[in-house]
């Protein structure tokens, strides 16, 4: 979903001047689409917490500019890092007109431009960056920070993709190719157990267009009828992703363009701690993303080689920065390269993100754990409230999504 983008703004003032000009000139229908979006806003639930409320109903260009100004000047914390994303999401929450505005034409260009500005901001060094880094270090606390190599980070993005100590994430069964490991620090959900071809068909209330997700890769057919697993990264998580299996990376892309915002029910993704369960993942094949296809060996019950197959890793960049950054080894593959289980593939800089794992039919029937392995953490209530659940969550009123 590549769209033409006018030259990016280099300052907030340039950005605000641009969208004001677009509004007054109705540039490419900007005013028309924005007004339709705010006129058709669906009210957020009555018990929405005050800190994530934002009433977009019939708001004009001054409100939009002030919202972006406040967002740009705001410093996200560990527990409130998603607040402005939620505030913005009410514009397109269950709102077809809002979805069109943020995913198409000038509204899409606006979100891409603002995301670019946020990226520049997170790459800046200086006192503001140090202040934000220190804020996150303090909120994460020494218990969590002891997992990381402590460095003199100069920018917030350098801190955000901080390197973890190797012994803190031991790779399970490194010599057993049949064992799949988590690609990141994440919340895991089975998405679908019957991936479809080109037409999304509901499976357990969820759809997935595997061809579009992989940018029409020739390997997409391998996963039709197979399984997808979502691995959702929280804002305060380790933000590098790794190979789930060993083998050879036979194809990789990190440049599939797509939308930056446009989750019809963003609050529904963070649902009572069961992050992503039953969520409509069909929209993720429209977001900015990349993928790596790994050829791996299958083993029989005796541990002997029993043919080969493929596993897909699809990093998806969502909201705020939408970055998908591969290490040089996995950029522009001309021939297969060896990859070890747990080997780093790339990272996400500041913003929302997830990895989707793809498996061939009948090869990954369920999440299976061994006794003594980690299945979760007894959380600090502040983190739970800030990242996993909201009191206003209720069964979704989602309608059929706009994505094909």
Image: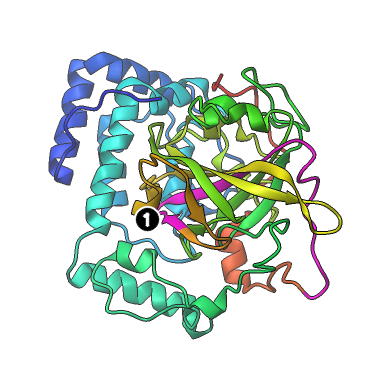
Residue 286, above or below 231: above
**Percent position of residue 211, x then y:** 57, 25
In this rendering, does residue 218 appear at all?
A: yes
Q: What residue is shown at x 33% (from left), y 15% (from top)?
A: 32
194 and 174: which one is in front? 174
Magenta-colored span: 345-372
Question: Which quadrant holds residue 18?
Answer: top left
Q: Residue furthest right?
A: 301
**Percent position of residue 232, x then y:** 58, 52
190 and 101: which one is in front? 190
Identify the image quadrant of the C terminus: top right
Find numbered disc 1 in the image and state the secondary structure of the residue it sits on: loop
Residue 26, above or below 50: above
The residue singled out by tag 1 in the image is 349
In this rendering, does residue 46 appear at all?
A: no
**Percent position of residue 327, x then y:** 37, 54
Q: What residue is shown at x 62% (from left), y 59% (from top)?
A: 182
Q: On the rendered structure, is 135 left or right of 389?
A: left
Q: What residue is shown at x 67% (from left), y 66% (from top)?
A: 175
Is residue 347 located in the magenta-colored stretch of the structure? yes
27 and 349: which one is in front? 349
Q: On the rendered structure, is 290 left or right of 106?
A: right
**Percent position of residue 72, x then y:** 27, 51
Identify the image quadrant of the N terminus: top left
Badge 1 local density, few (<14 within 10 Å), some, or many (20+)?
Answer: many
Q: On the rendered structure, is 106 left or right of 248?
A: left
Is residue 327 located in the magenta-colored stretch of the structure? no
Secondary structure, magenta segment, majority class: loop
252 and 182: which one is in front? 252
Q: What residue is shown at x 48% (from left), y 28% (from top)?
A: 215
Residue 338, above or below 342: above
The scheme the figure's colours follow is rainbow
């Amino acid at each position: 979903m590549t769209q033409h983008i006018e030259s990016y703004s280099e300052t907030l003032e340039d950005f605000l001047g641009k969208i004001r000009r677009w509004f007054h000139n109705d540039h490419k229908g900007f005013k028309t689409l924005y007004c339709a979006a705010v006129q058709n806003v669906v009210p957020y639930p009555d018990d929405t917490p005050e800190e994530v409320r934002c009433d977009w109903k019939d708001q004009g260009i001054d409100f939009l500019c002030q919202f972006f100004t406040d967002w740009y000047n705001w410093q996200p914390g560990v527990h409130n890092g998603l607040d402005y994303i939620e505030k913005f999401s009410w514009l397109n929450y269950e709102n077809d007109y809002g979805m069109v505005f943020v995913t198409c034409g000038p509204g899409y260009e606006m979100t891409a431009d603002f995301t670019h500005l946020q990226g520049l901001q997170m790459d800046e060094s200086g006192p503001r960056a140090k202040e934000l880094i220190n804020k996150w270090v303090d909120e994460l606390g020494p218990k969590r920070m002891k997992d990381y190599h402590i460095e003199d980070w100069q920018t917030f993005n350098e801190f955000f993709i901080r390197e973890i100590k190797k012994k803190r994430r031991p790779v399970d069964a490194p010599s057993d190719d049949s064992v799949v490991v988590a690609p990141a620090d994440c919340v895991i959900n089975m998405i679908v157990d019957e991936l479809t071809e080109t037409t999304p068909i509901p499976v357990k209330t969820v759809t997935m267009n595997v061809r579009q997700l992989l940018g029409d890769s020739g390997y997409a057919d391998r996963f039709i009828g197979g399984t997808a697993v979502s691995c959702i990264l929280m804002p305060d998580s380790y933000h590098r992703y790794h190979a789930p299996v060993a083998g050879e990376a036979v194809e990789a892309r990190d440049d599939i363009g797509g939308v930056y915002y446009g989750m019809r029910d963003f609050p529904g993704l963070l649902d009572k701690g069961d992050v992503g369960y039953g969520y409509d993942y069909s929209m993720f094949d429209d977001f900015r993303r990349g993928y790596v296809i790994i050829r791996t060996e299958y083993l029989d019950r005796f541990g002997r080689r029993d043919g080969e197959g493929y596993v897909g890793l699809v990093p998806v960049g969502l909201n705020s920065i939408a970055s998908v950054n591969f290490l040089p080894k996995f950029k522009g593959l001309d021939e297969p390269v060896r990859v070890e289980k747990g080997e780093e593939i790339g990272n996400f800089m500041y913003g929302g993100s997830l990895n989707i794992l793809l498996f061939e039919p009948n090869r990954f029937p369920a999440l299976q754990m061994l006794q003594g392995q980690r299945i979760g953490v007894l959380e600090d209530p502040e983190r739970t409230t800030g990242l996993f659940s909201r009191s206003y969550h209720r069964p979704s009123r989602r309608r059929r999504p706009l994505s094909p």
